[in-house]
């Protein structure tokens, strides 16, 4: 279990990393994000966090909408605020950092170019089926 905070200072009720990941996936799917992959980095000593959640939006506008919905949904529904986020300027790759889970929202061509799944090939990768 991880301790979750609001405004990164006041401890909230504990939620598991699995619950946090599911909240993120739900928020991605709410905005029609696709090609969702959960990359389990927990067995990799040099990993920056326990999990990556990677997904794509078709356009920079959709990438922004997905990242916004993740942040807004987790804050409004679960009182979870990210530690940091970046990438809104071009909105081709937005990262939202929740400590143990980092979310990467890409446009398809940048996801192929950076290929995080291949970079962390030692990790266990779980594909989440698209909702259609």
Image (spheres, grey):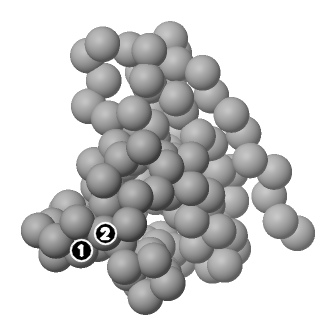
Place of residue 34 in the rendered image (x, y in percent of width and height, measured from the top left): 68, 59
Eyeballing the image, is 81 above or below 118? below
Eyeballing the image, is 118 above or below 39? above
Place of residue 28 in the rendered image (x, y in percent of width and height, measured from the top left): 59, 68
Which quadrant would residue 93 be assigned to in this image? Answer: bottom left
In the shown orientation, is residue 114 left or right of residue 122? left
Q: Which residue is mark 1?
A: 6
Quarter of the figure that contains the C terminus: bottom right
Eyeballing the image, is 123 above or below 61? above
Residue drawn where x is 30% and y is 53% of the image = 3
Whether residue 3 is visible to the viewer of this picture, yes or no, is: yes
Contact flag, marks 1 and 2 (Cβ < 8 Å): yes
Whether residue 91 is visible to the viewer of this picture, yes or no, is: no
Place of residue 114 in the rendered image (x, y in percent of width and height, measured from the top left): 40, 36
The foreground one among 5 and 90 is 5
Circle 1 Cα neighbour tier, 10 Å, few/some/many (<14 / 14–19 / ≥20) = some
In the shown orientation, is residue 31 left or right of residue 13? right
């Amino acid at each position: 279990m991880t301790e979750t905070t609001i405004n990164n200072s006041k401890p909230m009720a504990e939620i598991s990393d699995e619950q946090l990941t599911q909240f993120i996936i739900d928020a991605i799917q709410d905005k029609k994000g696709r090609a969702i992959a959960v990359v389990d980095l927990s067995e990799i000593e040099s990993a920056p966090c326990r999990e990556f959640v990677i997904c794509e939006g078709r356009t920079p506008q959709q990438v922004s909408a997905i990242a916004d919905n993740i942040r807004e949904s987790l804050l409004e529904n679960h009182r979870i605020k990210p530690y940091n986020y970046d990438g809104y300027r071009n909105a081709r790759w937005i990262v939202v950092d929740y400590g143990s889970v980092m979310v990467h929202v890409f446009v398809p061509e940048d996801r192929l170019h950076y290929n995080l799944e291949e970079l962390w090939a030692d990790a266990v990768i779980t594909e989440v089926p698209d909702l259609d």
